[in-house]
Image: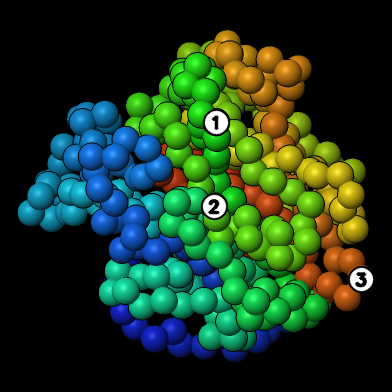
Amino acid sequence: MTTGRTYNQLHAPRTYSQAKRRISVYWTWSYPWEANRDVRNLDNRFSTMTEVRRVAWPAYETPEYSGANFLQGVDGTLELFHLSLVNFQKAAGEVTGYPVAVYQRVDQAGQRLPIDERILADTDTLMVFGLDHLAASEEATREELEAIRNWLKREGTCLILAPHHDVGATDDFKIRDVEYHHHGDRLVPSQQRFSGYARSLLKGLDLPLYNRWGLRPATVQGTQKTVPLKVASDLDKRGWFEGVSTLVFHQHLPHYEVLPGGKAPIHVLAQQPIDEKRPHPFTEAGNREFNMVVWMPPSGDRGGDIVFADSTIFTTLFGGDESLVRFWTNLAKN
């Protein structure tokens, strides 16, 4: 029997158990800000559901996505993200025995929830999904940074930080045009810059990483199955990549650039080969892979792990297979 959906409910705290992880997801967007964007603007907004239906036709020409049953504006597209997380919630819940709590920085009802003890008190793994556009000017407050720092001092915690892609970060339309034809997604405008909130965490927590570009993974010829990852198995001390060969095909994934001068160890665990048939400034500079998953092990007074991995790895809006589910399972166990 499937469970009923709840909305606008207060979270029921989960009891701590050393053997079971309590996972929470935090969408960094202001749902109303994103949903109320003027659709006459071409850049820096999500697609409307009407645009999704047109580009993906006939994929969404079923009764459940009709105007009578589903939102047709930008809000409909935001709901697709929520729906695409359900499979991860089910898989993680089966492993941990706990429901995955899902929060939004500002929800549909306009209720703002910063990251504080209401979220952190019963969370072992916090997944911060950076899908707020830079134009929304979302930033972590001093109090949030302090709360996260204190939470990470607890041994066994894990912050999964997921800044999203940064497409068209230039005023040069020739470069934007190359980027657009590289990823090939007609729903992504020439400029779509994400993750102001996640970037403020990178800066505020002194994490030496930056999200750049939107890169198309190389695929097995004639399919949308990505070619295998290049995994640094010797660095995978947590076993997150045991039995994992691929993650997800998404047309515009961020490169997690490791910056010099970091004060704590940082390891690139997995790199994804890039589709070199489609030109891009990153490959023209000599790069053949982008950093897909990066790990900062505990260091100093920080007892928790920090993992950088894009939010699309945890949704099925862009597909998924047994290898992806194995990655979810490994993270939920460890």
Give the distance between the C-alpha atoms of the residues marked 1 and 3, in whole angstroms. 38 Å
Question: Does residue 240 appear left or right of residue 125 in this picture?
Answer: right
Residue 191 placement: quadrant: top left
The label number, if any, that marks residue 300 in the structure image: 3
* The quarter of the displayed image where residue 150 is located: bottom right
Residue at left offset 88%, top offset 76%: 301
Residues 100 and 51: in front is 51
Mark 3 falls on what kind of element?
loop
Quick check: 268 above or below 141? above
Residue at the image point whose x is 55% and y is 46% from the top = 164
Name the side, left or right, on which 173 lies relative to 200: left
Q: CA distance from mark 2 to mark 1?
A: 16 Å
Closer to the observer: label 3 or label 2? 2
Give SS at disc 1.
loop
Position of residue 276 measured from the top left corner of the image (x, y, whole percent): 62, 14
In the rendered view, tell whether residue 22 sits above or below residue 218.
below
The mark found on residue 170 in the picture is 1
Residue 282 visible in the current orientation: yes
